[in-house]
Image (cartoon, rainbow, N blue to C red):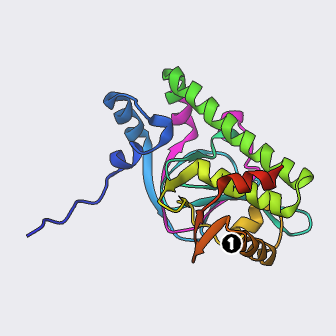
């Protein structure tokens, strides 16, 4: 009879955070001691704009949305984070209040590190500080690229760019094409590229009819990546 597998513990989850790739067991134990693992329900906010930046968050399971609401009341999504990501770190490092809202898109498991403990850990491990700086820079470049999309590209080009980004962040090569790991709703895509859900649905339908993608529910397979890249120019 097969024995039931034990549930993953906090240390198991920490080993899957990109920031800590390749660190020693003793360094991992240090991180474990200063984190607490919490379960967050779908649609539960983790923080809101203006909240004090008292903690850093490590996403273990589920997805988290970083967004803000403009003066018109329309939501703008900056990032949809997948497991393995760190977030909330930039305001903590700068000692500033939260500038965005963080909300769980699924039931999620998150590890929380107090600001004071995070500061001490970084001071003791400058190599982790260098890695963190690189991750922050990468995220800021992605957000800058998305803002440039909103200003300079038409809607089909913006959607094509988003799909290409999703290939880079998590695509599985299959016989027919590249299956995207991220399963975003049409509304989530719309919030990322600044348009309506209906426009996303119609444009995805056009991409499908042109043979660029295949859709099966929320699963998208990219059949012709080069075709999407041409739409971006």
Q: Which quadrant holds the N terminus?
A: bottom left
In terms of depth relative to the viewer, which is nearer, 123 or 72?
Answer: 72
> What range of the chain is rendered magenta?
92-120
> What x and y, as percent, mark residue 151?
91, 52
Q: How many marks?
A: 1
Q: In front here: 182 or 100?
A: 182
Q: Where on the picture, by quarter, is residue 178?
A: bottom right
Q: Residue at x 38, y 40 (%)?
A: 32
- Residue 145 position in % (x across, y down): 79, 45
Q: Which residue is mark 1?
A: 208
- Was residue 190 drawn as part of the magenta stretch in this picture? no
Look at the numbered disc 1 and give the secondary structure of its residue: helix
Point 54% across, 52% down: residue? 170
Q: Using the image, determine if residue 165 lies above or below residue 182.
A: above
Residue 148 higher or lower than 24, as above or below: below
x and y percentages locating residue 8 in the rendered image: 31, 55
């Amino acid at each position: 009879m097969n024995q039931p597998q034990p549930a993953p513990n906090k240390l198991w989850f920490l080993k899957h955070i990109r920031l800590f790739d390749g660190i020693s067991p003793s360094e991992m134990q240090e991180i474990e001691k200063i984190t607490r693992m919490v379960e967050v329900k779908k649609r539960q906010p983790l923080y809101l704009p203006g909240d004090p930046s008292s903690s850093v968050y490590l996403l273990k399971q589920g997805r988290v949305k970083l967004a803000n609401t403009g003066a018109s009341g329309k939501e703008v999504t900056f990032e949809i984070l997948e497991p393995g990501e760190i977030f909330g770190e930039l305001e903590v490092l700068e000692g500033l209040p939260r500038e965005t809202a963080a909300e769980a898109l699924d039931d999620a498991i998150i590890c929380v590190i107090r600001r004071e403990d995070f500061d001490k850990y970084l001071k003791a491990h400058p190599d982790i500080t260098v890695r963190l700086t690189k991750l922050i820079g990468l995220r800021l470049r992605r957000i800058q690229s998305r803002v440039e999309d909103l200003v300079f590209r038409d809607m089909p080009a913006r959607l094509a760019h988003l799909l290409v980004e999703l290939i880079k962040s998590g695509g599985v090569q299959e016989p027919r094409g590249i299956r995207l790991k991220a399963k975003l709703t049409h509304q989530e895509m719309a919030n990322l590229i600044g348009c309506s859900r209906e426009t996303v649905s119609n444009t995805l339908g056009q991409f499908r009819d042109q043979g660029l993608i295949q859709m099966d529910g929320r699963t998208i397979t990219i059949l012709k990546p080069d075709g999407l890249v041409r739409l971006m120019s």
